[in-house]
Structure formats: structure tokens, C-alpha cells
Image: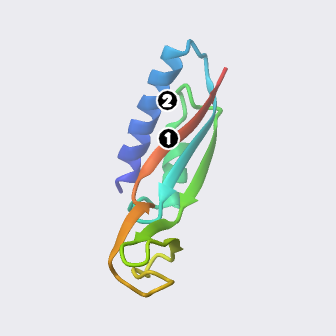
């Protein structure tokens, strides 16, 4: 389960940011997870809850925002959101698309005290 290594890296980043900002604790961690990222939100939540103990994030709220797939069609130049298993432009049905968002996981926000 790679969610455990992701959470460890996330906690390390939180610790680093807290040190840079002279924070004593982190009260909220917000991440964005793309539908195509390969990260399972439920497993990530469980891993975060497990590994945050005895860290600067011990009392933090963990917020996961799911990012749908955002594409731009090369034929009709339309931007659209896609369902997970649909890889064609909803307007013109072309499969010549560029994925603009929905493949990554990002740390979006930290609230610190």
C-alpha cells in the first residue's frame, strides 16, 4: 500500500513547513487528489490518521479534495471534465485530448499555530 509512504512524505513536508514558519502545531492539512493519481482517498485517510500520532499534525484535520479529470480537446478546443473511464471529448467525441488536471496529488493548504 503506497499510501503509507505518501503519508510519511506528507508528514515530513508538514514538519518542514512548520519549522520554516515557527509553528508549534498544524491544525489542518488540505490535499487535492486527482482521480487518475492512483491514490485511494479512504486508504490515505486511514494512513494519515494512523501515522499523525506523535507528530506536529497529531491534532490536525485532514481534508481531501477530489480533482476530476480536466481535459482540453485538440480538435474543438473545448475544456471539459471527464468521468473516470471516459477518454473522449464530450462535445465532439474526439479522442485527441490533453489532460490538464486530475493526475496528481498536491498539498494545497496548511493551517498552523
Q: Residues within 10 Å of mark 1 (few under 14, many from 20)?
A: some
- Total marks drawn? 2
Residue 10 in picture, x, y percent from top left: 44, 38
On residue 107, the disc is 1
Foreground residue, 59 or 21?
21
Tell me what residue is drawn at x 54 percent, y 41 percent. 108
Foreground residue, 90 or 74?
74
Q: Is residue 17 left or right of residue 6?
A: right
Mark nearer the N terminus (1 vs 2): 2
Q: Residues within 10 Å of mark 2 (few under 14, many from 20)?
A: many
- Is residue 37 visible to the viewer in this orientation of the structure? yes
Residue 77 in picture, x, y percent from top left: 44, 71
Image quarter (top left, top right, bottom left or bottom right) of the N terminus: bottom left
Residue underneath mark 2: 14
Q: Secondary structure at mark 1?
A: strand
Q: Is residue 48 above or below residue 22?
A: below
Foreground residue, 38 or 101?
101
Residue that extends furthest to the bottom in the rendered view of this protein: 93
Amino acid at each position: 500500500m503506497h499510501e503509507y509512504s505518501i503519508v510519511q512524505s506528507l508528514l515530513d513536508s508538514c514538519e518542514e513547513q512548520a519549522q520554516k514558519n515557527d509553528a508549534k502545531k498544524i491544525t489542518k492539512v488540505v490535499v487535492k487528489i486527482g482521480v487518475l493519481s492512483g491514490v485511494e482517498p479512504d486508504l490515505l485517510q486511514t494512513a494519515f490518521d494512523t501515522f499523525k500520532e506523535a507528530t506536529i499534525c497529531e491534532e490536525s484535520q485532514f481534508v481531501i479534495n477530489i480533482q476530476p479529470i480536466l481535459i482540453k480537446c485538440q480538435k474543438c478546443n473545448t475544456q471539459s471534465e471527464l468521468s473516470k473511464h471516459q477518454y473522449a471529448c464530450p462535445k465532439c467525441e474526439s479522442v485527441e485530448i490533453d489532460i490538464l488536471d486530475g493526475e496528481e496529488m498536491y498539498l494545497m493548504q496548511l493551517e498552523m499555530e
